Image (cartoon, helix red, strand yellow):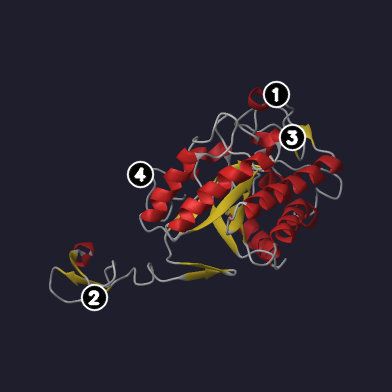
Amino acid sequence: MPGELIGERVKKDPGIDRFSVLVPLKGKPMLNPFQYLFTPLQVGKVTIRNRIFSPSHGTVFADSDSLPNERLADYHAERAKGGVGLIITEGTAVHPTGKPFSNTLVGFDEKCIPGFRLVASRVHDQGAKIFGQLYHRGRQMESLHTRLPVWGPSSIPSPATRENPHAMSREEIQEIVQGFAKAAAHLKEAGYDGVEIHGAHGYILNQFMSLLSNQREDEYGGSLENRLRFPIQVIQAVRKTVGADRVVGLRVSGDELVPGGLTLEDMREISPRLESTGMLDYISVSVGNYSTHYIMIGDMIFPWGRRFI
C-alpha cells in the first residue's frame, strides 16, 4: 500500500547531503527508489553532477531590449546553489521574425553574449551545467509583437493565433537554419555547456514535420523524408557550429494531440531518424502544440501517467 512507503528518512552517510535509505512505518528498511537521483550523468561529453534539472521556462526577466541581465543570472544561480545539476535557460529567439515580445531573450544579436556569459558564469560558480534552448515560433507568432510577417512552412494559420503566415521561400528557410547556428555560436562563446533545439509545441521545426502545418510541394514537404529535411539541416548546422565538446539536444512533442497532427506512432518513426544523424546527445519528449496548450503543462486534473510537462 502507498502508506507503507511513508516513513522516517535516514541518512546512510552523514557526510553527504542525501538520503539513501527509507525506514517504512513498519520498521523494515527499503532501498531508496531515488537511489540514482544524486549520481552523476554523462550527456555527450558533459558530466552533470546529478539527475535533477531545471527545464526551460519563461521568466520574462530579460531587459526591454531582450538581452540577459543580472536579474536572470541571479535567478538561475539560486537554483544551481540549491543543488540542481543542469539548468536549461528559456526559449531564445534565433531570428527577428521569431521574437514573441519584449523581455524575452534573443540569441541572434551578438549583444546577447555578455549577458549570457554572466548567466553561465554564475551557474558554473555553483557547480551546475547550463544549456540554452533555441527556438522560432513559426506560424504561432503574432505580427503584433514583431511588426514583421509571420513565417511558416505553408500559408496555414495556427488555430491559436489565427494569423495567416507567409509561406517561407527556400532562401528564408536557410536564413532560419543559419539563425539557429548563429545563436548557438553566441551561446558557445558565452560559455554555455550545450544547446537544446526546440522542435516541440508546434514551433517551426514541429511545423515542418507535421502535415497539419506543412503542405508544401517542394523538397521540404510531402514525404516524411522531405518534411524532416529542415529539422535535420538545423541539427547539422548547430552541431557544426558548437563542435563535439558541447551538448546538442532536441525537444520534441511525442504527440500533438490534435486531429491531423503528429501522433505517438509518427514520433516513434521520426525520433530514430533524427537520432540517426549522429549529431544529437539527447531527445527530450514533451507533448502538444498551442492548440492543446492546456495539456502541454498539465495541471492536477490529469491523472498520473497522463500528466506531461
Question: Can you identify the residue that label 3 sits on?
Answer: 151
Compared across the picture, whether 188 is left or right of 124 comes to right
Give coordinates of residue 234: x percent, y percent: 73, 53
Asked if labels 1 and 3 touch by Cβ distance under 8 angstroms, the answer is: no
> What residue is shown at x 48% (from left), y 57% (from top)?
124
Residue 12's disc number: 2
Q: Amino acid at mark 3?
A: Trp
Asked if labels 2 and 4 touch by Cβ distance under 8 angstroms, the answer is: no
How far, Cα to Cα, is label 3 from label 2? 56 Å
Q: In which quarter of the view is residue 285 placed? A: bottom right
> What residue is shown at x 23% (from left), y 75% (from top)?
12
Of labels 4 and 2, earlier in sequence is 2
How far, Cα to Cα, is label 4 from label 2? 34 Å
- In front of the other: 223 or 193: 193
Of labels 4 and 3, earlier in sequence is 3
Question: Can you identify the residue that label 1 sits on?
Answer: 147
- In front of the other: 291 or 169: 169
Q: Nearer the viewer, mark 1 or mark 4?
A: 1
Asked if labels 3 and 4 touch by Cβ distance under 8 angstroms, the answer is: no
Of labels 1 and 4, earlier in sequence is 1
Question: Can you identify the residue that label 4 sits on?
Answer: 300
Q: Secondary structure at mark 1?
A: loop
Give coordinates of residue 62: x percent, y percent: 53, 35
Q: Up-down: is 74 above or below 130?
A: above
Q: Secondary structure at mark 4?
A: loop
Q: In which quarter of the view is residue 203 placed? A: top right
How far, Cα to Cα, is label 3 from label 1? 12 Å
Give neighbour class at mark 3: few <14, some 14-19, many 20+ (Cα, 10 Å): many
Q: Is residue 257 visible?
A: no
Q: Secondary structure at mark 2?
A: loop
Compared across the picture, whether 193 is left or right of 272 comes to left
Q: Secondary structure at mark 3?
A: strand
